[in-house]
Image: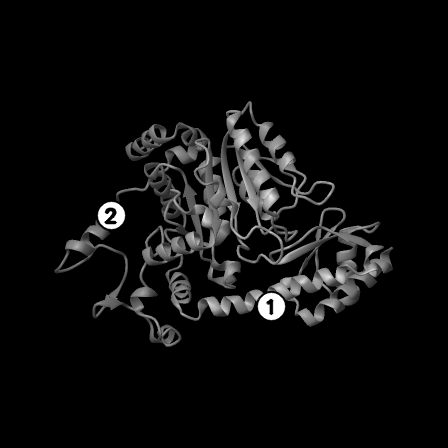
Amino acid sequence: MHDIARELNEQIKNENPHVYELLSDLGRNLYYPKGILTQTDEAKEKAYRFNATIGMAMEKGQPMYLPVIQETLSEYNPQDIYTYAPPAGKPKLRGIWREKLLKDNPSLLGKTFTQPIVTNALTHGLSIVADLFLNPEDTLVLPDKIWGNYTLIFGTRRDAKIKSFSFFTGDGKFNAQGMKDALLGQKEQGKAVLLLNFPNNPTGYTPVEEEAEAIIEALLEVAEQGINLAVIADDAYFGLFYEDSIKESLFGRIANIHPRILAIKVDGPTKEEYVWGFRVGFITFADASPVLCECLENKAKSIIRGTISNASHPAQTFVLHALESPDFEKQKQEKYKIMEGRALKVKEILNSALYQELWDYYPFNSGYFMCLKLKGVKAEELRLHLLQEYGVGVIALGESDIRVAFSCVEEEDLEELFAYIYRGTKDLA
């Protein structure tokens, strides 16, 4: 083990031994090297004559570029486009995203958490968490309604065991008791990683206040039983809350609540700001110790440095430009109203007695999606039938669930969409 990694681990142990126990073998070996980047940073400060430290081409005091590329980016300074971004991301972008977290999540006020670290969107952020905290045979606990990529990120890549619990109770509430039981099942192992994704993909559900309180109470009870928890809030669809759900991330409520609970937020502008192709995300850790937060940031930076070096500088610049614009909030609210209108229209359509004979729908109040629970028809058969006979695409999940992304269908077309799904279901029934 490298001396820097050993020193970091000692600091973590001294600040919070429970977090040290959560780290995977890889997580314990990680450290941010004092190598070329450190020497380059020193040269930026002190090399007033010539700076010959970094693998970039310069011309007339700025990064070299091709005019055929710059002509499409003429609004931006070449320094904000062509240079390498720092491994943890543009400092100004990180600072503004932190301010956004505090504004959007009142529960975070007064709590200790890292400056958000820039990732190559949320999938990359989740993979960093997997590397830091999961050894082979460690357990990831999550609901049974999930984004399928979790299995690849945590199961295939890290060989973790995946323990699921029913997302909903029989009366359509979030199953906090099932979550608690699944976590308590890890008592012998002494640790677990819990992943909560709200608004949820695929169901489009976010807990209401009573359910959020039950989740926090359950986590505290598990921690009091001596189980160390890394709790991931996958907030990919954050902000798209349409009805009675809580309006902030659970990360704010979980942060700093118990020494055995490490809160982790993975988020970004991908869905929030409708920039899917930019691939910019953030990972944020919360612990009562600023020193420990700094150590975790160091280890996360080392993964970034050892895999992708840094996230796209142009994409970070574009996101920063948007966040600083005086028109940002107004434009975002306009898009929110469109999304809200679609969600409420779907609910209006589905409450028709006509459709209730063929399916039920899972509760939804947020996000991009909703799910149908079919009666007597297999999901994959219906998916293929709709595609082949009616040119309609939906996602089949398991035996009986169909996910519908109302996010990509105009509000005025939603009735026709569900009419086709109804027709296809009747064909097969």
Q: Quadrant of the N terminus?
A: top left
Residue 323's disc number: none
> Which x, y percent locates residue 177?
64, 34
Residue at 36% of width from left, 28% of height from top? 13
Disc 2 crowd rating (10 Å Cα; few below 14, some 14-19, many 20+) is few
Q: Which of marks 2 and 1 is in front?
A: 1
Judge left or right: residue 224 versus residue 52. right
Amino acid carrying label 2: it is: Thr
Residue at x 38%, y 73% (from the top left corner) = 73
Quadrant in the picture for residue 340: bottom right
Quadrant of res 69:
bottom left
Q: Which of 28 and 284 is in front in this view?
A: 284
Instruction: Give the distance between the C-alpha atoms of the residues marked 2 and 1, in whole angstroms.
Output: 47 Å
Can residue 29 be seen here?
A: yes
> Is disc 2 placed on a helix, strand or loop?
helix
Residue 38: mark in rendering: 2
Q: In which quarter of the image is residue 306?
A: top left
Q: What element carries label 1?
A: helix
Left or right relative to 184: residue 229: left
Q: Mark 1 points at which residue?
A: 338
